[in-house]
Amino acid sequence: MRISRHRTLVGAAGFISALAAAAAGTTASAADAASSGAWSPTAHVWITTANGADKLSDLGTVQFSAAPSTAPTAVVDPTQTFQTMQGFGASITDASASVLYTLPAAQRAETMASLFSPITGDGLDYLRQPIGGTDMVATAPSTYDDLPAGQTDYAMKDFSIAHDQAQILPLLREAEHLNPHLQIMATPWSPPAWMKTSDSLIGGRLTATPQMCQSYALYLLKFIEAYRANDVRINAITIQNEPQNRTSNTYPGTDMPSWQEAAVIEDLGPMLKAAHLDTEIYGYDHNWSEDTTNITGTPADETMDINDYPQQLLNSPAAQWISGIAEHCYYGDPSAMTALHDQYPNEQIDETECSGSQSSDPANTFSDTLKWHSRNLEIGSTRNWSSTVVNWDLALNPQGGPHVGGCGTCTGVVTVGPGDTVTNNAEYYALGQLSRFVQPGAVRIGSTSFGTTGWNGEVEDVAFVNPDGSTVLVAHNENDNAQAFAVQEGDQRFTYTLPGDSLATFVWHGNLAGAHPLQQVDPTGWTAAANPATSGSDAVANAVDGDASTRYSTDAAQAPGQYLQVDFGKEIHARQVVFDTGASTGDYPRGYTVQTSSDGTDWTTVVPNGTGAGQFTTVALDGGPIQYVRMTLTTASGSWWSTADVRAYTADGGGSRG
């Protein structure tokens, strides 16, 4: 139920006041609620739609209740925890700085506040800053130690950041003043030309000598120190932007194999330590998967890097200095970050660059960008272990510039011009649906999601718990038509109809699951067997993959004797097992029995004659040790039987992953 509808942007001040109002009804425990009968938790709702009718609009509140819902229901589980969030933002490129400085000072300050202020604006708190020139420059790209051809400067005697002092550094200081939580990652597009085999910022490699690696590491160290001397702290650094891009023929770029990046890191790490700098080093800084055009013509000494660059770094001696891996959105799928996390669970993963782009019909740019970014970045990246969502240019002119070579269709978070006008683009609102509500230090928590980055027609979502205890759920409906969905935490749920092509944020305060909720068991290592043993998109393994957007299905009408059996891989003290149909809410078992076993041979019947009644079939257990659970159908039905998720819960932990 929607209580009020106000189309207004919200900053932290409005957000905090909304939470304060909500908190009065949600801080009590479920037990207190039962005794008083007065508990009425609510979630506050903000929405942006692709048609622009709503842009971070405050649409009031929706009330939780214990009433069941017939809509596909996403289950939020605060006991299941994932990565800690670092922040959301973009890059103050040379181009961004130049267009912001075309504005009168007062209007520039207003624009910066709308971007960085956590009180009145988007609260952006993470920037990825170029070290030297990129394609997005007002004039020609440069570095901090450019020399005439034939000269060298291994000791960095001519190093200077004078170029950045006029516009870029003042903007960075202003951003940090507006948002003290601001973090900055810095990345070079090219070493100085005299360091390279091409004698140019465009193309080529870093000259492969120990002296040059040391000099380049010193160059990066000097940058960090010079920025710190100008009151800008660099929290993290990468060694090379897009090191596998060998076709940057019109703008700065460097082909840097993993073995060479590792060599630079092995020099830079000790330098940072000796200088008492806590700047972290991240590796890679390129796409989710390697672009086929980059794979073609791979040099012989780089073949090991093909779709394995981060792994090569993390398996090298340089790994001791690496704090995480940075990835871009321009090729592949965000699921590559989960695959990397599964290999290296202790490494942080950040999505550090993704530009919006002009659509072939400019009238569709806002809609196309909002939908793609919502699906792949705001939700897709964060659901796949990224601790950041970082766009490319913070601000550009209406022509997508200025730029020299490179991207001719890029869009910024805001557009400056024509004249002194400033337009907030889809990126501004997509980022804001997270950055205004997900606080620094927030932790992503479990939430079943039926949508996919490839868009399967279902609602996609992601959830977080903030340090102040509030819960944030962001949901995306890419269907043209409105779509009802429900959200459940503990035994409380609400149903909401998302407008077509919308990105929504729901915020509530307090633990709706009660003071001592059951904790979900990590499904890693689970296996399943079934009759019928279907394959392909409805294979039985989908029931235990921890992904509610996939499912096991009989692909046939329900019949007695069909079964689904889950092996937890070890004994667990389960208090509850849930069979969840996911979005196929009509595919629940009409009649069934449930048995458990510790060895797969001797079985105990715990539900002799059950009847399904909707999306969730919940089996209560006594907490005794079991390794197997099996549901067998006893009743025929014309409906298929589908299970998107099997979840097991214990009273003694096991909820966190990674």
Image (spheres, rainbow, N blue to C red):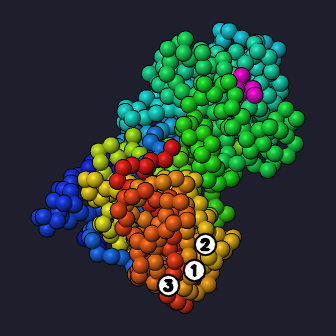
Mark 1 surroundings within 10 Å by alpha-carbon count, few (fewer than 14), some (14 through 19), many (20 or more):
some
Q: Does the image show residue 464?
A: no
Q: Quickly name the residue at label 2.
A: 530
Q: Could you say which is closer to the camera, residue 636 or residue 156? A: 636
* Main secondary-structure element of the magenta-colored stretch: helix
Against 173, residue 488 (above or below) is below
Q: Could you say which is closer to the camera, residue 555 or residue 223? A: 555
Q: Position of residue 249 (x, y in %)?
A: 80, 39
Q: Which residue is drawn at 49% across and 59% down?
A: 598
Q: The disc labelled 2 sits on which kind of residue?
A: Ala
Residue 634 disc label = 3
In the image, which residues are magenta? Answer: 259-263
Q: In this view, does 195 lie to the left or right of 398?
A: right
Q: In which quarter of the image is residue 201?
A: top right
Whether the residues at callouts 2 and 1 have beta carbons within 8 Å, the answer is yes
Residue 562 disc label = 1
* Magenta span contains residue 261: yes
Q: The disc labelled 3 sits on which kind of residue?
A: Thr
Q: Where is residue 118 in the image (x, y as percent from the top left)?
A: 35, 43
Q: The disc labelled 1 sits on which kind of residue?
A: Gln
Q: In which quarter of the image is residue 96?
A: top right
Q: In this view, does 244 lie to the left or right of 224?
A: right
Q: Does the image show residue 594?
A: yes
Mark 3 surroundings within 10 Å by alpha-carbon count, few (fewer than 14), some (14 through 19), many (20 or more):
many
* Magenta span contains residue 593: no
Against 374, residue 228 (above or below) is above
Q: Could you say which is closer to the camera, residue 136 or residue 282? A: 282
Q: Is mark 3 on a helix, strand or loop?
A: loop
Q: Is residue 367 left or right of residue 14?
A: right
Q: How far apart are marks 2 and 3 (CA)?
A: 15 Å
Of mark 2 and mark 1, the one earlier in the sequence is 2
